[in-house]
Amino acid sequence: MSYVTKHLLPGERVVYRAHLHWIIFSGAVVLAILAIAAAVLLWYWPRPRYQYWWGPAAALGALALLAAIGPWIRRTSSEFAVTDKRVLIKVGFIGRDSLETLLSKIEAIGVDQHLWARVFNYGTITVIGTGGTHEAFPLIAAPMEFRRQVQAQIVSLDSARAAAPAVVAPSGEPALAAPREERDCPYCAERILARAKVCRYCGRDVEPLVS
């Protein structure tokens, strides 16, 4: 089970997934091209042909496979998802770096692309959130689409809140909502209900405050 699927909240659904761009395999691709070129060159070398003509090509091919292992692990162990409630990002296999941010807490999604990044459609996305969150993730495929999906979900969330009917008291006056008693989560510092037993942001057990 993937990290994103495992950490979805009840009723939460994934609307978009991104991944690392294939450019991370560029080193392995160059070695593979050199291996093919060496095989062709040595095969057509003027007679008498070198007896072990396949040796250099095989060595370069082996190096290409070894060079592809690291990027493959990096790509398969990285997840980037936009849900209807949050942005979830996880990178790393042994050393894990994860980010789970509510859409309401996101101030902006920055995209940084140089010339070749625009040509091959990859770049760095930076998640800027309230409370000083400023996390950058490089080499993401289609970063502009990732930002568009986040913005679309934020707009959808804001529209749903604006369209929610107001609570009306029996007298016809708009009812005032009961004051919410809140406190900071001792682990992630997000605001939670004072009587909460589990933080809805980090998922850890907390001691409820009894008035």
Image (cartoon, rainbow, N blue to C red):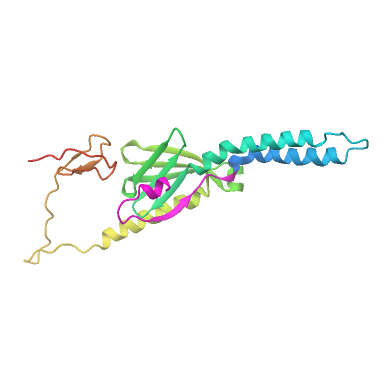
Count of residue discs: 0
Question: Would you place residue 33 above or below residue 164 in this image?
Answer: above
Say which residue appears at 31% left-offset and 49% top-offset: 104
Q: Position of residue 44 (x, y in %)?
A: 87, 41
Can you say which quadrant of the picture contains the C terminus? top left
Q: Position of residue 106 (x, y in %)?
A: 35, 45
- Splitting the image into 4 quarters, where does residue 186 fall? top left
User: Is 35 contained in the magenta span?
Assistant: no
Relative horizontal placement of residue 56, taking residue 189 as reference (left or right): right
Relative horizontal placement of residue 150, taking residue 121 as reference (left or right): left
Q: Position of residue 142 (x, y in %)?
A: 53, 50
- Give the magenta range: 1-22
Q: Position of residue 116 (x, y in %)?
A: 61, 43
Q: Looking at the picture, tell me which residue is in the foreground, 82 or 109.
A: 82
Residue 133 shows in the view: yes
Say which residue appears at 42% left-offset and 43% top-offset: 89
**Residue closest to the far right:** 47
Residue 112 shows in the view: no
Say which residue appears at 39% left-offset and 46% top-offset: 88
Question: Would you place residue 105 above or below residue 58 in this image?
Answer: below
Q: Looking at the picture, tell me which residue is in the foreground, 110 or 48.
A: 48
